[in-house]
Image (tube, rainbow, N blue to C red):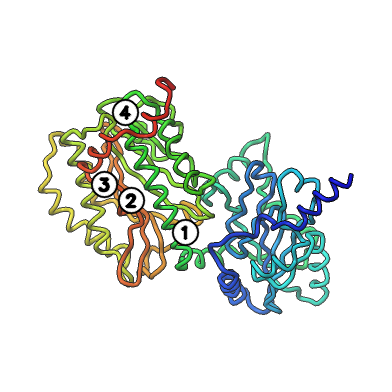
Amino acid sequence: MKHAIFFLSVIASAQPNGIDQKDFPPAEFQERRAKVFDAIGRRALALIPCASATDTPHIFRQSNEFYYLSGIESPNCYMLLDGRTRKTSVYLQHRNPAWERQVGPVVAAEDVAIVKERAGVDDVFGVEMLARHLAPIQVHHPAPALYVPFSPEEGATGSRDEMLRRVAEAASDPWDGRPSRTGHLLSLLRSRFPTFELRDLTPVLDPMRLIKSPREISVIRRASQIAGLAITEAIRSTRPGIYEYQLDAVARYVFLLNGSRYPAYPAIIGGGTNAWHGHYHHNASVLKSGDLVLMDYAPDYRYYTSDITRHWPVNGKFTPDQRALCEFILAYRGAFLKRIRPGVTPDQVLDGARTEMEAFLKTLTFTNPNYRKGAVAALNFRGHLQHPVGMTVHDPGNYRGKPFVEGIVFALDPMLWIPEENLYVRMEDVVAVTATGVENFTDFLVSTPDEIEKLMREPGLLQLRALTKP
């Protein structure tokens, strides 16, 4: 018995996990919360829930919204921002020695000093105190507005568009119909504290998250570099007869080797016509000689991600038409990169690049007229400057219709379709708008046909480690 008491006391005094991130100082979280205070005003509060432990039973990952404002990785907790005092309180679960005996020390309500220090918050309480603190605020009428994120919380592999789709699928299933966790919280707040006017915090957070800080950009840059290393190894490992999922395995190894615990989204690895489906993720087909394979994959690295795509010939040699398509996409990327800078709108970038590419297209030779037709159609497509990238692959915020500003990070994704052959070709990089231009985080990744063919002559992980037959 004495040994058990000693063991638990060691756990209690150990450094708790969940408050040990090193990417952002407390001052940056305080700056973000200050922007929330400015937005909600002096007569309002904001309540931000965290992720539930039951949502991530293996390795806990915090919700993006909660992490963005605190850096705390603990389940089933809440953050209250009081606009009247401009103070932040965090409500955590209490220490559970029996659970920590299994998983190690976890940050808890008892870790007041360290939570205040690392997250820069004003107060730390047990989670049971939240209701007791909200109740007396309603005494004076009208009660302050209470801001809560209405959008589904984002977690591992969960961009908002994907989370909204899952909510819709559950709602449309007559044998399910469960509300989202966010919807359930809103329902509880309305029933328990009906005098609060609930308002959506999402439109406050989205513009903040669109403009990345230098520290955020540093983490996204690293996530992009890891994605580039993973695709590099997948290119080396490609041979006719291997399965798409084996390239997934190679990439995941590189992710984990470099400190990423999760993928940011399911791997898209499409050989031949599988690539035609933009979000193909079955990854169960054999790669065939003569086909191109497209890979779109990136890690979730310390709560930030990337979005990188390349395509290459399964047998290591581009056909003349495949080479021409690759050269067209590569030139299109270059036309975009030379025009992206602060003060220029996305439409101006698209228009200028199209004019340049119309001249370049005349220099290319296609034996298949459908390939030229697809390239011409690509010049009129307006989606090559894709979505913001940050804590999710399809990050919130909107940069369209206004000039670029420093700190915007997005996916640059020139693409084309050959519908007659169900062929889809892309080259995607993640770029950041800088003070003077643009930074391509994966400018080191092979892109030209010659570079790709040279890389494919090298042995990859699959040739060194895989069994002869999957």
* Residue underneath mark 1: 219
Q: CA distance from mark 4 to mark 2?
A: 26 Å
Quarter of the rendering occupied by the N terminus: top right
Q: Earlier in the sequence, mark 2 or mark 1?
A: 1
Asked if the residue under mark 3 is in contact with the one under mark 1, i.e. CB atoms within 8 Å, the reply is: no
Q: Nearer the viewer, mark 2 or mark 1?
A: 1
Which of the two residues, 431 or 13, is positioned nearer the viewer here? 13
Q: Quadrant of residue 111?
A: bottom right
| Three-letter amino acid code of the residue under disc 2 | Asp
Q: Earlier in the sequence, mark 1 or mark 3?
A: 1
Q: Crowding near pointer 1: few (<14 within 10 Å), some, many (20+)?
A: many
* Residue underneath mark 2: 413
* Residue underneath mark 3: 447
x, y percent for residue 45: 69, 71
**SS class, disc 3:** loop
x, y percent for residue 330: 23, 49
From this view, report whether residue 28 is shown above or below residue 154.
below
Q: CA distance from mark 1 to mark 3?
A: 23 Å
Q: Residue furthest right?
A: 1
**SS class, disc 1:** helix
Q: CA distance from mark 2 to mark 1?
A: 21 Å
**SS class, disc 4:** loop
From this view, report whether residue 351 is shown above or below residue 454.
below
Q: CA distance from mark 2 to mark 3?
A: 13 Å
| Three-letter amino acid code of the residue under disc 3 | Ser
Asked if the residue under mark 2 is in contact with the one under mark 4, i.e. CB atoms within 8 Å, the reply is: no
x, y percent for residue 275: 35, 35
* Residue underneath mark 4: 239
Q: Crowding near pointer 2: few (<14 within 10 Å), some, many (20+)?
A: many
Q: Is residue 45 visible?
A: no
Q: CA distance from mark 3 to mark 4?
A: 19 Å
Q: Crowding near pointer 4: few (<14 within 10 Å), some, many (20+)?
A: many
